[in-house]
Amino acid sequence: MDPVIYKYHQPFTLESGISLPKLKIAYHYYGEYTPGKKVAWVCHALTANSDVADWWKGLVGEGSMINPDDYFIVCANIIGSCYGSTGPMSVDQFPMITIRDMVRAHILLRQHLGIEKIDLLLGGSMGGYQALEWAIMEPTVIQKMFLIATTAAESAWAIAIHTAQRLSIEADNTWKEAKPNAGAKGLKAARAIGMLTYRNYGIFKEKQTDADAEKTDGLKAASYINYQGDKLVNRFNAYSYWLLTKSMDSHHLARGRGGDLKSTLAAIQIPTLVIGIKSDILCPLAEQKFLEDHMPNANLVAIDSMYGHDGFIIETATITAHLKTWLTKVVKTIEL
């Protein structure tokens, strides 16, 4: 299913003060919106698109817990991406953007759709960055929030990883050429670096170890990493990848809000389920524990998964069970 395109024909001023002359926002929706129907809005991660029923199968979509019979579901492609929203391939010399800029674009779409309340805002990884920002920017709009494998501020560890990825892209001699596939080899290398952080030692050992002790080349783990790199190159763009990792690096909820994360999080009163993945080395469980410790209405659940950070899109059965239990408790509390 192709996305719907919302065209905003007015200047859109970024957090930097730079203005885009106009804006396109690509989005998917599922179900029909009628007054009184619950709205679930999903914020997607780095290289995902707005077709959340495709990439978050088992949690969102027909037959899932978040389904179009119970919810009007919306997911918008973030600005700066390459899946239909305004980004580097649609604007010459596209400027730096922040997570807040992405959320302000979401808000424009929300207003365009006539949505006054979002019953459940969901975000995993970078999607959680957007959800947290949105909770601060529109606290009376968001009723409940679900976060997984995310953080209140980008860590030095993640910034270093992103820098290594961008160095890979910049080392490609086609980088910055005026063509869609510029930096493709660099993007492949960047994805390879990313895969080492999305997964972990344990899953590589279990799934990618060669049984043949005599093998000296064409090793299984090497083939897997090459495959993953090629797969991203075939669906994404180096310009967007470079730009969006910079956006992630600048993520800090307390920027411009006094600088103190604890007090900034304390202001978020929205009932929130936070799920952390015990094997996640990119956004470790300690990051989600920090959210629970400082958000007054947050509850943390730590789950087991061999898949590390990628568990947030793979472990949908476990996620569904915890989300269902939590929502039931929250609704009962509200009714009391």
Image (cartoon, grey):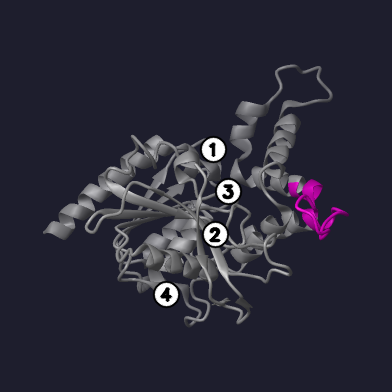
Q: Is residue 326 above or below residue 206?
A: below
Q: Say which element carries label 2.
A: loop
Q: Are marks 1 and 3 in contact (CB under 8 Å)?
A: no
Q: Is residue 116 above or below residue 323?
A: below
Mark 2 to mark 4: distance in Å?
24 Å
Q: Measuring from the top left, give residue 165's x and y in whole percent.
A: 73, 54
Residue underneath mark 2: 78
Magenta stretch bounds:
168-187
Tell me which numbered mark, 3 or 2, is placed earlier along the sequence.
Answer: 2
Q: Amino acid at mark 1?
A: Tyr
Q: Say which element carries label 1.
A: loop
Residue underneath mark 1: 307
Q: Residue at x 75, y 52 (%)?
A: 180
Label 2 neighbour load within 10 Å: few <14, some 14-19, many 20+: many
Q: Say which element carries label 4.
A: helix
Q: Of circles 2 and 4, which is in front?
A: 2
Tell me which numbered mark, 3 or 4, is placed earlier along the sequence.
Answer: 4
Q: Measuring from the top left, give residue 93's x and y in whole percent.
A: 73, 70
Q: Amino acid at mark 4?
A: Thr
Label 1 neighbour load within 10 Å: few <14, some 14-19, many 20+: many
Tell me which numbered mark, 2 or 4, is placed earlier along the sequence.
Answer: 2
Q: Of circles 3 and 2, which is in front?
A: 2
Q: Amino acid at mark 3?
A: Ile
Q: Nearer the viewer, residue 218 or 58?
A: 58
Q: Residue at x 61, y 75 (%)?
A: 21
Is residue 249 in sight in this rendering? yes
Q: In the picture, which quadrant includes the C terminus?
A: bottom left
Residue underneath mark 3: 281
Q: Main secondary structure of the magenta part?
A: loop
Label 4 neighbour load within 10 Å: few <14, some 14-19, many 20+: some
Residue underneath mark 4: 264
Mark 1 to mark 4: distance in Å?
31 Å
